[in-house]
Image: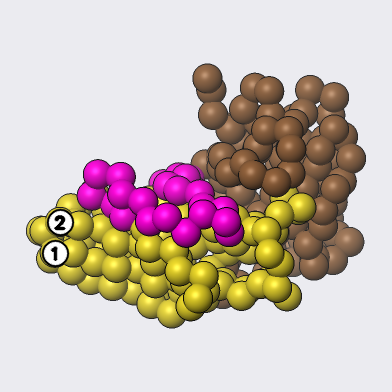
Chain colours: A yellow, B brown
Amino acid sequence: AQKVTQAQTEISVVEKEDVTLDCVYETRDTTYYLFWYKQPPSGELVFLIRRNSFDEQNEISGRYSWNFQKSTSSFNFTITASQVVDSAVYFCALKRGNFNKFYFGSGTKLNVKP
Amino acid sequence: KAGVTQTPRYLIKTRGQQVTLSCSPISGHRSVSWYQQTPGQGLQFLFEYFSETQRNKGNFPGRFSGRQFSNSRSEMNVSTLELGDSALYLCASSQEGETYNEQFFGPGTRLTVL
């Protein structure tokens, strides 16, 4: 069975602080894909990043970075120098290699205060 | 390129009624998936259509059904509405091919059942 766990329900930080959102996944597949999506109050899910199971290279995109570790089944997301506009709910998701079906975590609500 | 569009954006129905939601995918995308988002259950996969055929299905009762047209537009129908069907219904589209592409989400239809 596939499962994605985001243990942090809600996080509050002050602007310019760094924050890490945790994601732990479960799957027996060898080929799978991991995603992060951002959901602002408007409701639309915005794609942030995709990683496949064969690529453990960490990635940095501006203030965002992702740490993928297969040994711990984790795909954590760090925002450096957070901004108020980063306030949103962030979802981690898993997609099996042969199925176009996403398994989402329960989401982490990030509040960035000025 | 226009994004995924969903209509209507908001809907209020009463128990026992039925409802039809519409989704227009990004031009060229042939896969359309539907998700239900509720505070209690989070984001749950309903079904996926590809080339007018249901390809994947989640664990929802038969009251939830869908279809896809030759132009890839999709509709989702819920019959005999229950209070628990109140949710944000998100549609996502992706390009042909199952194994790698992220899904692009629409803004959702917020359904309230009274």
- Residue on which the image places disc 2: A81
Can the viewer see residue B8? no
Q: Which mark is residue A17?
A: 1
| Quadrant of the frame with the C terminus of chain A | bottom left
In the image, the segment drawn in magenta is A42-65
Category of crowding for the residue at label 1, using alpha-carbon neighbours closer than 10 angstroms: few (below 14), some (14–19), many (at least 20): few
SS class, disc 1: loop
Q: Residue at the spot x=42%, y=55% of the render?
A: A57
Tell me whether circle 1 and circle 2 mark residues in contact (CB < 8 Å): yes
- Residue B5: x %, y % from top left: 59, 32
- Residue B51: x %, y % from top left: 85, 33
Q: Nearer the viewer, residue B92 or B113?
A: B92
Category of crowding for the residue at label 2, using alpha-carbon neighbours closer than 10 angstroms: few (below 14), some (14–19), many (at least 20): few
Tell me which label, 1 or 2, sits earlier in the chain: 1
Q: Amino acid at mark 1?
A: Glu
Does the segment drawn in magenta span residue A62? yes
Q: Is residue A18 left or right of residue B48?
A: left
Q: Amino acid at mark 2?
A: Ala
- Residue B72: x %, y % from top left: 77, 28
SS class, disc 2: loop
To which chain does the residue with label 1 belong? A
Q: Which mark is residue A27?
A: none
Q: Nearer the viewer, residue B52 or B22?
A: B52
| Quadrant of the frame with the N terminus of chain A | bottom right
